[in-house]
Amino acid sequence: MAHEITVRQDGTAEAAFALTPAWHELGIVLDHPMTSVEALTAAQLDWKVIQRPVAVGVPTTIPTPEGMVETLRYYDIPNMLANVRADNGLVLGTVSEVYRIVQNTEAFVFLDGLVIDHAMEYESAFSLSGGRKVVLLGRLPKVDEIVRGDETLRYILLSLHHDGTGAIRFGPTAVRIVCANTYSLALNEGGIADLKAGEFTREVAIRHMGDVKGKLQKAREILTAANRQFDAHADASRELASHRMSGAEWDRFLDLMCPVLDPRDADWTEKRAERIDKTRAAIVAAYHSPRQTLEGVAETAWAAYNAVAEHIDHLPRRGATPLRRAEARFNVCLYGAGRDMKRRAFETVCRFAGLTSLAV
């Protein structure tokens, strides 16, 4: 399945989430933000990775009293090791001898240490593809209040690749990561680069070699840069909330986001025209919904953006089962046309509000 969450032989999933279940309905859901100990235990990630020599079997014919017999002769592969789960013996991948393991427990300790008094709270923790990848999503203590009663959260992603196919990845994200799909989306949010002194991007990739722990300590500088980006996005959102949309501006924004189909258009059909009319009506309804009529939000550029986002996120999707419909909604919201429309809506309302240079 698309989620790639590890499911053990006993049928339980190596996944834990705070407060809200994931669309795939796997894993444990706690009724409060998780501590590192709770997340590690609930997601069943307290296993270790060990390394074993790698050998290759070569078919060989040897003489015996009964005649020639086919067998395998094993030869060690120099400078190569296998990463193996210590609890079940699963081979996660092959790596060079310079590869340095970072255990799941070490990743939690590292994220905890980024925040004063170990105040990091965990939104999700899970493994993918049998444990080949482990993903942790921490929630930073600071909450951005755009207007009173309208808050946004700050997330930090850390992932380990125990299969040797990737580096340790660390960086800020606005996506609640619950499976392989959202993990991929988060990686595509910003640039990725090797962690080098003085070269920090939105997200970094730390190679499993050399002084790994020393490199991880430099991630504090990345967290500082990430918080600046979060601050910039929150400031932009507050600017949007302070810009009142006139009736003419709202009509123009709606036309830009979802233009009426002209009957003179060669592609005009009654079905397409009706679908566009329904979309426009849904966005207008969202603009005037209780969520967008909070004090300080109503009839602002912030409400205009959220009206589009709300329509995309809550639009019913097709599927044979509730799970399939949930997956379809998830994919539309975070990928393809839905994601692109939300991004375009944000950039468009920024221009209405006179914001032309944003670190978002």
Image (cartoon, rainbow, N blue to C red):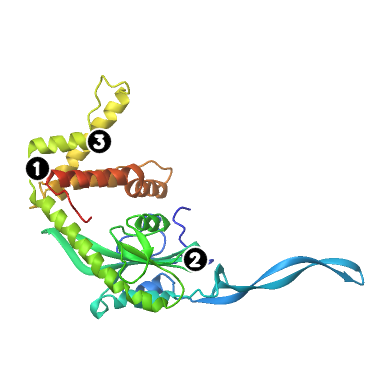
Residue 104, placed above or below residue 314: below
The answer to whether residue 319 of the structure is visible from this angle is yes
Q: Which amino acid type corresponds to the residue marked 1 in the rendered image?
A: Met
Locate residue 30, reporting x and y percent: 33, 68
Binning the other alpha carbons within 10 Å of mark 3 as few (below 14), some (14 to 19) or many (20 upward) gives some
User: Is residue 292 shown left or right of residue 261?
Assistant: left
x and y, in percent, of residue 196 in the image? 36, 70
Q: Label 2, secondary structure: give it.
A: loop
* The C terminus lies in quadrant: bottom left
Q: Earlier in the sequence, mark 2 or mark 3?
A: 2
Which is nearer the eye, 265 or 275? 265
Percent x, y of residue 54: 63, 72
Residue to which mark 1 is pinned: 245
Closer to the chain start, of discs 3 and 1, is 1
- Give the crowd class for mark 2: few <14, some 14-19, many >=20 residues within 10 Å: many
Q: Nearer the viewer, residue 72 or 280?
A: 72
Foreground mark, 2 or 3, reads: 2
- Is residue 312 shown left or right of residue 64? left
What residue sits right under mark 2 in the picture? Answer: 132
Answer with left or right where residue 61 lies relative to residue 308: right
The answer to the question of whether label 3 and label 1 lie on touching residues, with beta carbons closer than 8 A, is no
Residue at the spot of label 3? 279
- Mark 3, secondary structure of its residue: helix
